[in-house]
Image (cartoon, grey):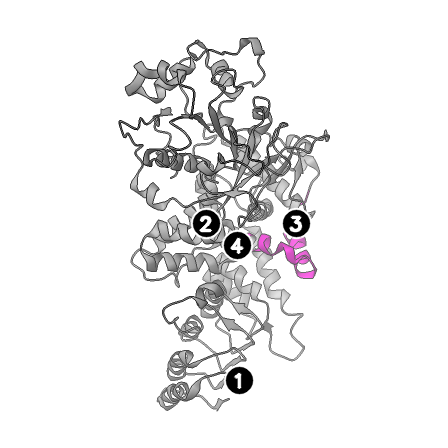
């Protein structure tokens, strides 16, 4: 959405004259939704990008030394008092580079940038379609069509001019040209490539400032064009900015709170929202879910579904004429991700990228960041997925996406052994949790259909049988002989909720009769997962929650809440009231329950025909809370025999 309106013109006109008071026009939604990004400024470099300037954020976008939030801040003096003249803004696709440029243009129109620059010219490198030959004055004329006759005068007055090259990686021309071929005259007509290089190398208009946005993969060639440049890396949304973005997107405070609470309660989703386009993806999907609803308590949109939508957006209009190329690329990408997850690797060497055939400029930058190797190393550059959870997602895809056996088999890499993955997770590799969770989401019927129709990948249904068998067997060893079979791991409910299929859940839990959890801080996402499973668990007879606490949002928000929160156990009690519930025993011991829970418990006592035992040890119900419980006990439908 951020880029759609931006590329309608080849070169955008942002050379406002103060007397004319011309201002760039942006859609109201862009201006209202814009949220500041965290940008880390790097020290001045004479040798290309500083080490670490282009690495993957891996979900970290909080306070960073040298952080800036606006384009204007990037041109402020550094710690040594040096004012940057050339700034390279680096970021992976979807991190907000073009959005920052658009915001700078709005600020220029509003006068925010007047103190730094009198003239601002923005060139969209992705859509450039100028004549094959042009001068700098011609570029200015294209930027300011209503002032073509003044182009020569504008470039003659070289003070306080800023040229913005948005999307440098799209130019794709050689950065190595003989110095003698470059221009020093703004009016001299040269091949477009030479004219642009003359600006970058500052043989023409040496006093002008430059802002260049680029993906990490173009840094090597860009570094050959520049001298004394500064680097800045977009880290994405900080924790506070993520919440701000949700509120700006929805405008309606209650819907914004509901959507952000949903995302905040899901650790994987919340971490991914550091990527601006992922925040947009989540908001877009939740906006549809909230139509006609007050909350998202019934939302069935799992993390996997949102990841698939995100993937489909990245791959839109790419290699449609040659889908086999895209399929081969995705298969190799998934193999790379899985290999890295198994070996605890997040950095991959350039040789490995090339050996797998992943060095495709139209696809690789969508998923991997390129890091410049340290000075003195000759191993080539290294690559990292733009977020660890993205690597885990593609690692999951490796195990379930069908291929002809030749695509990845020739490299002698991992086998697609789902059982081995699950066994390793059960025994010692708890770091595989997210990978396993995505695995369940990918084999849901909805995901299988979506992948086939939208992305063009076929998912093998065989993995469903292995996952079902594993779930049915993993808790049997925990239960003691002669005792009821119980489920005592919260991740089981996460996995089933991620798949979100009634029949699969019934089959997975059908052999168990008890649920026992201890000392868990139950987030809203946890409670939704529990409630979904309880509703489809016909043989559930006993629930024991010891030392568990119920939360509707993050602790900081709860401390600052101005209105009373709904009953913490609302979702649990609602799930237990479903038809067919066989529950006989409910133990909520040391769960910190208060008076606010008693109305829900009373309703449960009144409506549940089989509940015979209720234990509320170490709760602070108060006299009024007990009175509410008594109303439920007096109800004709109450069958309770023991209250503790």
Label 4 vs label 3, nearer the camera? 4
Locate the N terminus by quadrant. Answer: top left
Question: Based on the displayed image, in which of its 4 quarters is residue 517 positioned?
Answer: bottom right
Residue pointed to by mark 4:
268
Label 3 vs label 2, nearer the camera? 2
Marks 3 and 2, Cα distance to the nearest angstrom? 26 Å
Sequence order check: which comes first, mark 1 or mark 4? Answer: 4
477 sits to left or right of 110: right
Marks 1 and 4, Cα distance to the nearest angstrom? 33 Å
Marks 2 and 1, Cα distance to the nearest angstrom? 40 Å
Residue pointed to by mark 1:
617
Residue pointed to by mark 3:
417
442 is higher (above) or lower (below) than 155: below
Magenta: main secondary structure equals: helix
Q: Residue at x 56, y 25 (%)?
A: 222
218 is higher (above) or lower (below) than 510: above
Sequence order check: which comes first, mark 3 or mark 1? Answer: 3
Contact, mark 3 vs mark 1 (Cβ under 8 Å): no
Q: Residues within 10 Å of mark 3 (few under 14, many from 20)?
A: few
571 is higher (above) or lower (below) than 91: below
Residue pointed to by mark 2:
306
Label 2 vs label 4, nearer the camera? 4
Instruction: State the SS at label 3.
Output: loop
Contact, mark 1 vs mark 4 (Cβ under 8 Å): no
Sequence order check: which comes first, mark 3 or mark 2? Answer: 2
Question: Based on the displayed image, in which of its 4 quarters is residue 114 positioned?
Answer: top left
* Range of magenta residues: 414-438
Q: Residue at x 45, y 30 (%)?
A: 320
Marks 3 and 1, Cα distance to the nearest angstrom? 46 Å
């Amino acid at each position: 959405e951020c880029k759609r309106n931006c590329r309608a013109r080849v070169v955008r006109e942002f050379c406002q004259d103060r007397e004319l008071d011309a201002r760039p026009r942006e859609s109201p939604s862009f201006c209202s939704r814009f949220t500041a990004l965290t940008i880390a400024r790097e020290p001045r470099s004479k040798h290309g990008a500083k080490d670490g300037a282009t690495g993957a954020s891996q979900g970290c976008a909080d306070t960073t030394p040298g952080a800036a939030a606006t384009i204007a801040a990037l041109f402020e003096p550094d710690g040594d008092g040096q004012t940057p003249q050339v700034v390279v803004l680096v970021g992976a696709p979807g991190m907000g580079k073009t959005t920052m440029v658009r915001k700078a243009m709005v600020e220029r129109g509003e006068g925010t940038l007047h103190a730094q620059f009198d003239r601002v010219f923005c060139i969209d490198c992705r859509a450039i379609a100028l004549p094959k030959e042009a001068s700098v004055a011609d570029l200015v004329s294209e930027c300011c069509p209503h002032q073509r006759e003044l182009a020569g005068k504008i470039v003659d007055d070289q003070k306080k001019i800023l040229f913005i090259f948005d999307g440098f990686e799209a130019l794709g021309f050689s950065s190595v040209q003989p110095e003698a071929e470059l221009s020093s005259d703004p009016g001299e007509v040269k091949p477009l490539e030479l004219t642009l290089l003359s600006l970058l190398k500052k043989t023409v208009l040496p006093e002008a400032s430059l802002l260049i946005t680029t993906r990490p993969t173009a840094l090597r060639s860009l570094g050959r064009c520049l001298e004394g440049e500064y680097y800045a890396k977009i880290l994405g949304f900080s924790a506070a900015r993520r919440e701000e973005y949700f509120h700006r997107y929805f405008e309606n405070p209650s819907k914004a709170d509901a959507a952000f609470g949903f995302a905040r309660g899901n650790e994987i989703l919340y971490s991914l929202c550091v990527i601006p386009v992922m925040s947009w993806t989540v908001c877009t999907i939740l906006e549809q879910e909230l139509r006609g609803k007050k909350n998202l308590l019934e939302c069935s949109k799992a993390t996997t579904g949102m990841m698939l939508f995100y993937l489909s957006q990245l791959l839109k209009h790419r290699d449609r004429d040659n889908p086999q190329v895209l399929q081969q690329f995705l298969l190799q990408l998934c193999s790379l991700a899985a290999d890295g997850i198994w070996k605890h690797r997040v950095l991959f060497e350039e040789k490995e990228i090339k050996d797998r055939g992943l060095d495709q400029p139209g696809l690789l930058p969508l998923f991997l960041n390129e890091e410049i190797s340290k000075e003195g190393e000759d191993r080539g550059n290294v690559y990292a997925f733009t977020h660890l959870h993205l690597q885990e997602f593609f690692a999951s895809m490796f195990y379930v996406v069908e291929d002809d056996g030749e695509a990845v088999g020739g490299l002698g890499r991992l086998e697609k052994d789902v059982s081995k993955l699950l066994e390793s997770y059960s025994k010692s590799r708890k770091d595989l949790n997210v990978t396993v969770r995505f695995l369940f989401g990918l084999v849901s019927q909805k995901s299988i259909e979506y992948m086939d129709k939208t992305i063009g990948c076929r998912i093998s249904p065989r993995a469903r049988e292995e996952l079902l068998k594993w779930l049915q067997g993993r808790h049997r060893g925990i239960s003691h002989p002669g005792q009821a079979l119980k489920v005592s791991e919260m991740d089981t409910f996460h996995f089933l909720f991620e798949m979100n299929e009634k029949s699969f859940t019934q089959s997975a839990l059908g052999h168990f009769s008890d649920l026992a959890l201890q000392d868990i801080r139950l987030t809203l996402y946890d409670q939704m997962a529990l409630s979904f499973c309880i509703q489809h668990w016909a043989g559930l007879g006993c629930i024991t929650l010891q030392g568990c606490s119920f939360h509707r949002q993050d602790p900081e928000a709860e401390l600052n809440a101005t209105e009373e929160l709904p009953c913490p156990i609302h979702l649990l009690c609602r799930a237990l009231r479903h038809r067919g519930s066989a529950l006989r025993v409910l133990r909520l011991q040391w769960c910190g329950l208060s008076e606010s829970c008693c109305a829900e418990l009373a309703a449960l006592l009144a409506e549940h025909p089989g509940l015979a035992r209720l234990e509320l040890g170490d709760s602070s119900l108060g006299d009024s809370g007990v009175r509410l419980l008594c109303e439920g006990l007096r109800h004709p439908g109450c069958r309770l025999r023991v209250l503790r």
